[in-house]
Amino acid sequence: MSTSLAPPQHASPRTIPEQLRERLASIVGVKRVLAHRSELFTYTADGLPGYRKHPALAVFPGTRDELLKVVRELAKARTAFVVRGAGTGLSGGALAEGTVLLGVQRLTRVVDVDADNRRAVVEPGVVNSAITRAVAGHGLHFAPDPSSQAACTIGGNVAENAGGPHCLKYGVTLNHVLALTVALPDGEVVTLGNPCGENEGYDLLGAFVGSEGCFGVVLDATIRLSRDPQAVRTLLADFTDVDDAARAVSGIVAAGIVPAALEMMDNATIRAVEASVYAAGYPADAAAVLLVELDGLEAGITEEVARVDRICRDSRARDVRIARDANERMKLWQGRKKAFGAMGRVAPHLVVQDAVVPRTKLPDVLREIRAIGERHRVRVCNVFHAGDGNLHPNIPYDAANADEATRVERAMSEIMRACIAAGGTITGEHGVGLDKIGYMDLVFSGDSLAAMCRLRDVFDPERRANPGKVVPMHSCREWGRSAAPASVAALRAPLAAGPLAEETARIRDEIREARERRAPVRIVGAGTWLDAGAPVNEPRQLAVRDAAIVEYVPGDLTMTARAGASLASLAAAAREHGQFLALDPMGARAGTLGATLATASAGPLAHAFGTPRDNVLGVELVTGEGLVARGGGRVVKNVAGFDLVRLAVGAWGTLGVITEATLRLRALPERELTIALALPDDSRRLTAVLESVRALPLAALALEVVNAPLAGAIGAGERHLLLARLGGNEALVAAQRATLAAIGDVAELPSDVWARLREAEPAGHAVVRLSTLPSIASSLAAEAANLAPETLVHATLSRGVVRCILPPHALGRGFVARDREYHGTRLTRIWERLPAARWRELAGPGPSDRLTRRTRDAFDPDRVLNRGILGEER
Amino acid sequence: MIPATIQPDPTHQLQPRECALPGTPLAAARHGIDACVHCGFCLQACPTYLALEDENDSPRGRILLMRALVEGELAPTDPAVNKHIDQCLGCRGCETACPSGVPYGHLLEATRATLSGNRHQVARLVLLVFAHRWLLRPALALAKLFRATRLPRLLAKLPGNLGFSMAMLASTRVPLKRRSYTPDAGGERGTAAMLDGCVMDSLFAETNAATARVLEHNGYAMKAARGQGCCGALHAHAGDLDAARKLARANVRAFEASGADVVAVNAAGCGAMMKEYGQLLADDPEYAERAARVSARVRDVSELLAAAGPRRGAPLPMVVTYDAPCHLLHAQRVVTPPMQVLGAIPDLALVPLADADQCCGAAGIYNLVEPDISAKVLAPKIQRIAATGASLVATGNPGCHMQIGAGLRRGGIGASSIHPVDLLDASYAAARGDGSTG
């Protein structure tokens, strides 16, 4: 336990002791330690030129080994440090003031490429676009594409949870990192996430991604690679009015189209780009242009292009043109991606913002930004990710002009407030760093900031890694957690906060009472999953009942609901607006949102849409300490503050009670079709067919293997089946059906087969999820399918997950219950249900590493929430 | 053409600001520094950053050092500043990566001119020789005589700088046997005067002759420009702007007097310099306009040939790759014409070279002044060339020719460097039936 820490006493000197300098030099070589002021001058700035901070020393290890040694040496000397990659960040996050700057740009090895499993292991200094170059021969790429991708490093991408234009469809860095090897600031090396299976325990990987260098140093990253799309179409739509362009954005999203990217540039930006070497042929007299990219399978894309074209023209686009070839497409993108750099043509200095607003608020907010600019006589250039509502209002100015600098500062502050007031947040992808730390109080309550501080202390209790960034110091003042957190909240009133919901207040009070009386509670929602997880036998229950939908704006494709709401009720509400929630966990449909998130339960839709962590935008969490914290927000892209959302999701209630969540919704496809492909019985032939399916060009919503007994239980026949849920326009669905029909017998099934699949669990059966590399999962699924009669098995091959519902007689068999390895690779086994008597024997204790313990200590110090549910020592 | 000094947005009134080095070339170039927004897009385009892995040796880092000089944060005598400014190759690869249009080459020259008191010994000597024809001619003639012996090829195996220099010299022999032919001389595309150059005029005299032939064959009537000399590029890059201006004035006079429509240059570095004479002499009341007019007429030989088609020759069945000289690609922004030249040769298989836009490390006299860094920059270039399997690397600049040629020779790669014009010339000769491709 580290609960009684004194305030940090780490060295933060302007000069580093000669001895430390020598020891560092002995690790990395004399030439790789810079200590002279003139040599350090280059390192006083990152990608945001408004700040200059002088490091006391800079050290540049060349290998992973050297990097680790340097971190340990700094730990020994208790010296603060700032990790820096390529220095392209736009929030001042990699600036070191009087501390050690630790540059990782020399660690540029692509350690391993596993094309079959679509993943690679890279060192932190590898440049983002170099990854794609390295794997291009395999028809793969790394999806996150921040505009600085030609220079920025993967270490920086992880630290900032970088986005980019294509994250609209493909997600941000968080969604593309499978595991990290990390050196904690104290020198301990830990693996976060699981490179070959599902994550076990808390989602510390999710917490780490986006922690802006405050949690530790990445030694290597296992990243997910994406298949290159079969077809890509890039459209440039030209508008004479910004409002029209904003309306076209809303129109495209409302039509259920998910472009790969949807970008807007205004006239000032267009002109700066067109004057540069990256001139893309944007019309110089347009008020705004939209860059829309559609990609996916060849089938159906022409129809999709025609729809976008029509929507743009209906919104009074003057012209819409399609890039004719790869070269023209590249030019259109280069112009967009270098737009920020091109601003240097306008004036010597530049402020860059990164606020996010709900998509439906875009026209209003853009108008307001224009008014603010006019009021302060500054020129705002807008270039941004319109599809996400992620704005980048840039203001070029001359810092030597004190009056202008003041006006710029005022305008920026007003723009930030306007975005927050519209329900947005202060940063979507650039991070808080130094630049936006002053705005954190506007978005987050004192409790939320305090909870973020707790999270930081899990990784870096001495607060030596990137000190003074992200969370304002004053919110961390209650060191040793002795101070009453509630009193802190009263001091500040965030712009976005309303009064606490009645149930949130009740739950907070009950948790406080539980702490005082040392009387642990069991969290209960609908009560349908109480037999999941390790047995918890607490007489006291803490009920989560509030089932209200707090806010649903169909145009934003987001829904905020209280945790007691059933998934069925949320699905019904979304369906009325032609939308759906991509969460279909196994179990009764009465199961609640809170339980789904707490257990991170996923179903077949995870194949295309990921697990709950990938679908939750924000949570309200009452921690075991009694803090009412909000993480994330109500917008689709958000990197403000440390990630309490990922921490809460999958924690099984052991860190806090999720009381509310904001979810990302999807538009229902134009056409949906469920197909069953009959599979062979024999394990070897089954494996071969599943392997061939893995390589098929499909864009299915779900692709689930179901064994014969389970097929029978859901009324789909008596053979092993591959269930494919196809969605999209007519042409896309038909093409995929034909692709499947080419390899075997297919039959159409009614769509309610998916609901039956979720509810197919016989009472009293044990349930275990096995996971491994996708390349091994086919064989694992085939073998499991034929394991024993009455054993129900289904598998999502793309995720490498095989779920077995075991009758008592099959419990304890070989690879299902006991083997640590399968085909030479570690087999990950997560028990969902297991007779209490056999838990200890088969499931063993849950993760008990130091970080897991510290996390629990930080959020539920008295162990009052769901004690023992993770199988931990009670 | 790319304006080398950036014009700030006219709607944006810049405030006058303090300058620590008033009256210096760097102070005059300050607008260029201001254009840098520190985005870092130049980092991966910079050969010294990739080789040395220190941002002090990157464009963004060096610009920050320049800024520190004008703002008085660092002194012009600071050894670190001088070191990193000296270590720049001046390849200007960053300029074609820069969205803000920072005129980096111009800033570098201005900075070096401002710091000129601290110039390298070897550089001083070389610049002195190149500035004076009576020193340069005999020096190059000696080198040519020496090349005629087998010694350079033998000595090229020696380790270190001497061996490398010998390999460079050995690589200047055109790797094709050929006989001359009489080109068609229609002159329908107007008149052209050629810059003879220094190294080109001696060690690459055959290439100069070939250049004249292929231009005539493509409709240019060649005229002489008497009184011409060194273009001054080496001096300008080293910051010796006065010497560069002196040489530039002489060339302006010579090419004016030639009366030719265009100035043909077959050395990318010289062409880049001559295209910037207008700027170099912008403050010279007598020469400013005249220099600008001459600059406007300067063309790389590949541009002239591409404009003419060029005419196709006889097949040369060989595998060739192309490496872009930085001063052709980044400074002159001439991208496709050299490919068009090679494309006029039937059966010549042109294989793409990875990272052809990256510097080879020659950079004028850089390989003499900073041999270690130069070798580091060259190494990946040689690897990539070897990976193409080509037997010839076409490149239109003598510095790159010798650097790559030496690297290939010492690396035991069975390939040589060659000027694209030499290949086209051989193809024309073969078409006349009186040449062979050896």
Image (cartoon, coloured by chain):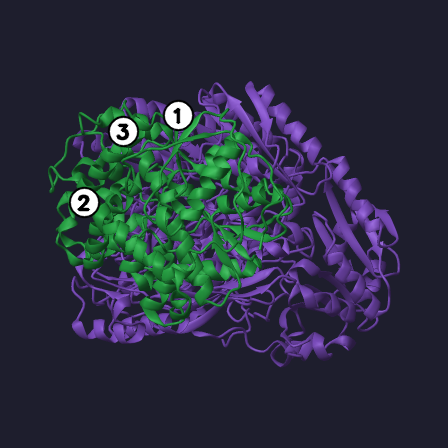
Chain colours: A purple, B green
Q: Which mark is residue B291?
A: 3
Q: Which mark is residue B261?
A: 1
Label 1 Cα neighbours within 10 Å, binned few <14 / some 14-19 / many ≥20: many
Residue underneath mark 2? B113
Q: Against A648, is B2 above or below?
A: above
Amino acid type, callout 3: Ala
Q: Against B291, is B150 above or below?
A: below
Q: Is residue A175 left or right of residue A8?
A: right
Q: Against A636, is B188 above or below?
A: above
Same chain, marks 3 and 1? yes
First in residue order: circle 2 vs circle 3? 2
Q: Along the line of sight, which residue is nearer the eye, A366 or B155?
A: B155
Residue A692 visible, this orientation: yes
Amino acid type, callout 2: Ala
Quarter of image, res A517: bottom left
Image depth: mark 2 or mark 3 in front: 3
Question: Please, which chain is the residue tagged with disc 3 on?
Answer: B
Q: Is residue A605 left or right of residue A364?
A: right
